[in-house]
Amino acid sequence: ISNESELSVKQDVDSIEISGKEFSLVFDKISGVISSYKVNGTEIFKQGFSGDFWRLPTDNDKGWGLQSVAKVWRLATQEQTLTNISLEKISDSQVKVITDFSLANGVADLSLSYSVSANGQITIDSVFTPLNEKLPVMPRVGLHAEFKGEFNQINWFGRGPHENYADRKESAAVGIYQSSVDKQVHDYARPQESGTKSDIR
């Protein structure tokens, strides 16, 4: 990606497009999600970022009823309604797009702020605000995105090369590792944790 210093920004009723010399980034104003991110003409995303607060229950989860007790977080992951989207110019070489969402019809709010630089770098800050003091334990908190299938290699600095967890990681040395995405999943008969790497930095 180039060090081009200026950004081009175009807006219409449905979208915000930000582009530099070697990239273009498009936000959908209806959903608030990135609908396209191209670098040198190559599309990166299949689906842009959204809040993720749910995972499939494992055997241990089912033992205490996660699927019933915490089902509001499944709903919050599925139902994210855009309440505001705004564009702020920081400088000629940086802009910020702020997207605000209501989760599960008012259970919580999520704000995602994208700082976009002229070299194509995107920094995302997220702010999660619960709107009820009696919400159940959250199975997961993070962001979800889907990349195009050709992006199938991963590198990490942490424990590996095999999967490892907080209570089962002594056999995994800290190092720099490379693998493919398809090798991170173990096809258990029922959903279980799979592919985790501890102490990533």
Image (cartoon, rainbow, N blue to C red):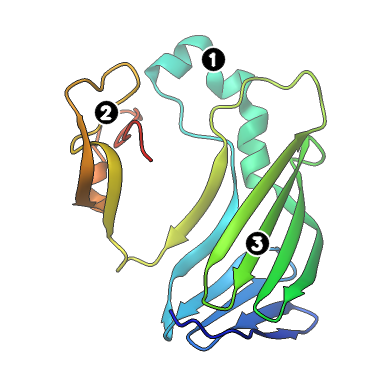
In the rendered view, does 104 fall on the left or right side of 57? right
* Image point (47%, 86%), residue name: 22
Disc 2 vs disc 1: which is toward the camera?
Answer: 2
Image quadrant for the C terminus? top left
Disc 2 packing (10 Å; few <14; some 14–19; many ≥20): some
Q: Nearer the N terminus, badge 2 or badge 1?
A: 1
User: Label 3, label 2: how many angstroms apart (C-alpha)?
Assistant: 32 Å
Q: Which residue is mark 2?
A: 164
Q: Is residue 102 left or right of residue 36?
A: right
The three-letter amino acid code for the residue at tag 2 is Asn
Q: Is residue 147 left or right of residue 34?
A: left
Q: Looking at numbered disc 1 in the image, what kind of residue is underneath it?
A: Gly
Could you say which is closer to the camera, residue 171 or residue 33? 171
Which dot marks residue 65?
1
The answer for how far apart the CA atoms under marks 1 and 3 are is: 36 Å
Q: Quadrant of residue 95?
A: bottom right
Up the image or down, 38 lies above or below 130; here it is below
| Label 2 secondary element | loop
Q: Position of residue 198 (x, y in %)?
A: 33, 31
Q: Which residue is mark 3?
A: 114
Question: Which residue is located at x 56 percent, y 65 percent?
Answer: 122
| Residue drawn at point x = 79 percent, y = 70 percent | 88
Of the residues shown, which amino acid type is indicated by label 3? Answer: Tyr
Q: Secondary structure at mark 3?
A: strand
Which residue is more in the foreground, 41 or 82?
A: 41
Tag 1 secondary structure: loop
Classed neighbour count for the residue bearing mark 3: other residues with Cα under 10 Å, few (<14), some (14–19), many (≥20): some
Would you place residue 1 above or below residue 107 in this image? Answer: below
Q: Are marks 3 and 2 in contact (CB under 8 Å)?
A: no
Among the 4 quarters of the image, the one containing residue 68: top right
